[in-house]
Every structure is written in C-alpha cells, then in structure tokens.
Amino acid sequence: MQGSWACSSPPVRRPTAEAKTVDPRAASGFGASADAYERGRPSYPRHAIAALVRELELTPASTVLDLAAGTGKLTRELLELVGPVIAVDPSAAMLAMLRTQLPAVDARAGTAETLPLADESVDAVFVGEAFHWFRTAEAGREIARVLTPRGGLALLWNRERWTETDLPWLPAFEALLKPHRQAAGPFPADQWEHTLGQTGLFAPLSRTDVDHVRQSSVDGVAALVASWSWIANLPGDQRARLLTQVGELIGDQPQLTLRYRTEIHWTRAIADAG
C-alpha cells in the first residue's frame, strides 16, 4: 500500500444521483432478498482466495475493496488475509446485513460506476457474483481510478455443478425455474470480458476454476432460489407459491450436497494507461 488511503488528498469522490442508478432488476431484487442471500448463497473456497491474494501480491498491509459486497460473503474471506477491507454496495438492505455481521468493516453505499473512494486508494478490487450487472466500460474506468499502480482486479462467480446423481429432483427443479429465468432476460454485461479489454486499462485476464462442495438443507436451497434476482422480483404471491413448489420437489431431506465451481478471473491495472 502506498499510503494514499490515509492522505487528505485527492478527495473522496461522491456518487451523484445519476451515477447511483443500477439495473432496476438488481436494485429491486437484491434489496428485497438480503436475508435470503445471506442464508442461501455459498461462500468462496478459502484456499482459492488465499492463492489469489498471493498471486496479486497482497499482504496484511494491503487495502482491498470488496465491490458489490452484498452481505459480506467474500468480505469475510478477505478479512483473514489482507489489511483493511472496504465494502461497497448500492443496496441499503445488503449493507445493513453486512454491518450487522461485520460491524468493524468500513461499509459504504456506492456503485461500480461511481465509487466513493479516492484515487489510488486501494491495492486490489474484488468483485463476487456481480460484475455482470455493471456497465463494464464505466466500471472499468472507476476501478482503474481507485487502484494503486498495477493494482489487482479479481472477479469471481460460483457456478452450480449440480447433478441428478446428487439431487434426483434436479430435472423437475430446472423445468420449474427455467421459464422465469428466460423471462428475466440477459444480464446487462454478459459480454464483459471483451468490453473490459477494450478499455486498455488492464492487462490480459488470467483464469482458473476451483471446485468446492456445500452442504445445505431444503430451507437453504429455498433461500438460495429466493436470492436470485429473477425470483426475488416476482410478485409476492407468485414467489411464495414457487418457493413452496421447490420445497415440495426436494421433499424431506435433512442434508443436500451442492457442488460448485468457482470461476476466478484476475488482472492488474496497466500503470501508464491513460
């Protein structure tokens, strides 16, 4: 860390009303599902996060931004490995849950496109399960602005690797949910890799995939489904009926094995870009 976080200048950039806008599906969906998100979403494999921290040459003195931190799933892992972690999220409900769980964390309201941080104030930016919601070019410029020279950027997604062998009810579950996912439409930045590369602000991306397993329950799976934005945005009665159907499909099982593959991309800011 270069000490810029402690400096009085440059000033912290404050989001404008326009810049605070996020995709309305994300704003309404995640604002209504903070509790479900905390109960249902998987965390990240600790050994993979530790390896990523080493790869980006972060230390216990490094300041890290957890962007779109949600309820703090990734924040918890980072706190064990680096120095100060700043959590930024646009959702008041998500931030309230994070502050309850992690009261010592510096948690701030903000968006990827207008970050409430000073220039060159963090050594790395981590984004878990969210970069596909951002306006990629604008977010890339903001991330590059707040990073120290050659600072790191890490993007993570937990992808379900569920199988019918582990979960016999899976085909019926997928058939039940597929129409709702299709009706929600594509995420705003499904082609983020190309757009981020076009900014010229970051080195070529590296990637790895790490398998991990989570033990859950029927209630845990129902909470996971409820946390998906395209389910959270359904009318209340329809959402309640759907979640009841999910529980009925799974039946009375005390423990469920949920397999995931964590997709990890990382890069560094180009020091002399722009």
Image: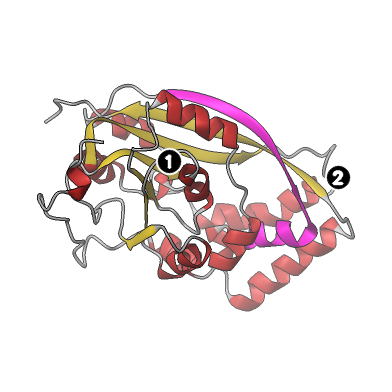
* Furthest residue in direction right, as rendered: 252
* Image quadrant where one finds the N terminus: top left
**Residue at horizontal 35 percent and vertical 27 percent from the top:** 267
**Residue at horizontal 41 percent and vertical 39 percent from the top:** 82
* Residue occupied by mark 1: 190
**120 magenta-colored:** no
* Residue occupied by mark 2: 168
**Residue at horizontal 18 percent and vertical 61 percent from the top:** 14
125 relative to 183 in the view: left or right: left
- The residues bearing labels 1 and 2 have C-alpha atoms spaced at a distance of 30 Å
Horizontal and vertical percent for residue 171? 78, 46
11 relative to 60 in the view: left or right: left
Camera sees residue 44: yes
Horizontal and vertical percent for residue 153? 35, 34
Identify which amino acid the numbered label 2 is placed on: Pro
Q: What is the magenta range?
A: 206-226
Q: How crowded is the residue under tag 1: few (<14 C-alpha within 10 Å), some, or many (20+)?
A: some
Camera sees residue 89: no
Q: Which of the numbered marks, if any, corresponds to residue 136?
A: none
Identify which amino acid the numbered label 1 is placed on: Asp
* Image quadrant where one finds the C terminus: top left
